[in-house]
Image (spheres, rainbow, N blue to C red):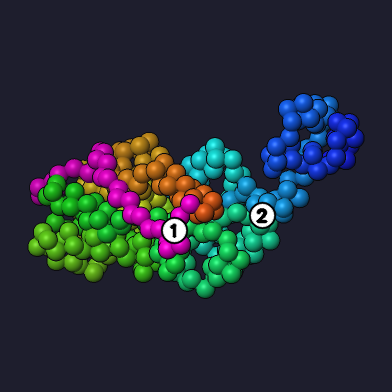
Amino acid sequence: MATIYDVARAAGVSTTTVSHVLNGTRHVSEETQQRVLEAVKELRFRPNSLARSLVRQETRTIALIVPDNVNPFFAELARGIEDFGFGAGYSVILCNSDRDTNKELAYLDMLISKRVDGIIYMTMSTHLDQLQPLLDNRIPLVTFDREYQGIDAILLDNAQGGYDATQHLISLGHRRIATIGGPDAKTRSHERIRGYERALAEAGLAIDPQLVLAGDWTYESGVVAARQIVELRVPPTAIFACNDMMAIGAMTALREHGLGVPEDMSIVGFDNISLATFLFPPLTTLATPLVEVSQRLCQLLLDRINGQLPAEPHRSTIRGELVRRASTAPVMSS
């Protein structure tokens, strides 16, 4: 493997001149520059990226930590971030935490040791303490749908989304509406359920605790919750699931019980993953603009890395939009 010394010898210049040509750190005459580049090509010289990163204090690498890349929501976001980052000249490392705090901490230690330039952090955790090593090492950090003091974030308007999804069902004449939330009561699930409760209250509908069930964002938990719903003495006529995967699970459970969607029960999800359009029937859902979110997350991190933002943390909120499909219909009169 050729070294910088070989290139300098072949071009008849010093190693310092070779470095200036390759890194653009000082003006070099066109003739000298051409000799260096020809020597690089002839010798198939590849600069040591690790050594260059140590000098420049950058690796052109960012990382993304997600709680569950099996969930299409996070898989689609990850793809968008990778595409945007690659287009901006950055490699993207994907880390899947499996909602395991110990695994998450191990990944953070690894990313610090690899000197990544920044991290996009999507986690189920609400504890700032585990992010302290990143702050101590001055690694730029952006979080998604989590708000931590002093840290840049892109947030979803979850409360409004929960309200819009529930209001849609109410507008179709449904008065007994169940909801399947997630396990993290202090964050996304709480806000979406709060929107559900506000829509019911504005319509003069009582909140029945039996109709508020908890899942864990997975398909399987949607199946379990819907099985409980259909066993109620007075079942609802509609379900609002706080993400699409639980909504899809609920649709499966309803079919198991011989119930049609939307003939016997309407269902609304949240996220608008690609799979939602391929279901039978296609799923009505509160759409998160995944392409926009991924681009804004990546751009915000790169702006922070490149020192283009003021010191105070940047926060912005994205509002979703209801996508009406065939999984919802007016309530059937008995």
User: What SS does tag 2 mark?
Assistant: loop
Residues in magenta, as a range: 308-334
Q: Amino acid at mark 1?
A: Pro
In depth, the one of 318 and 259 nearer the eye is 318
Instruction: Specify the quadrant that holds the N terminus.
Output: top right
Work out whether mark 1 precedes mark 2 in sequence or the reverse, and give the earlier one. 2
Question: Where, by quadrant of the figure, is residue 281 drawn?
Answer: top left
Q: Is residue 227 left or right of residue 75?
A: left
Q: Is residue 9 left or right of residue 319?
A: right
Q: Residue at x 33, y 54 (%)?
A: 317
Answer whether labels 1 and 2 touch (C-beta < 8 Å).
no
Which label is found at residue 42? none
In depth, the one of 244 and 93 nearer the eye is 93
On screen, residue 160 above or below 128: above
In depth, the one of 30 and 37 nearer the eye is 30
Q: Is residue 237 left or right of residue 52?
A: left
Q: Is residue 272 left or right of residue 167?
A: right
Q: Residue at x 46, y 62 (%)?
A: 311
Q: Position of residue 268 (x, y in %)?
A: 27, 49
Q: Position of residue 46 (x, y in %)?
A: 78, 37
Q: Residue at x 48, y 61 (%)?
A: 123
Q: Position of residue 203 (x, y in %)?
A: 10, 59
Q: Is 221 in the magenta? A: no
Count of numbered circles in the view: 2
Q: Position of residue 295 (x, y in %)?
A: 44, 44
Q: Amino acid at mark 2?
A: Gln
Identify residue for label 1: 310
User: What SS does tag 1 mark?
Assistant: loop
Identify residue for label 2: 57
Q: Residue at x 79, y 30 (%)?
A: 32
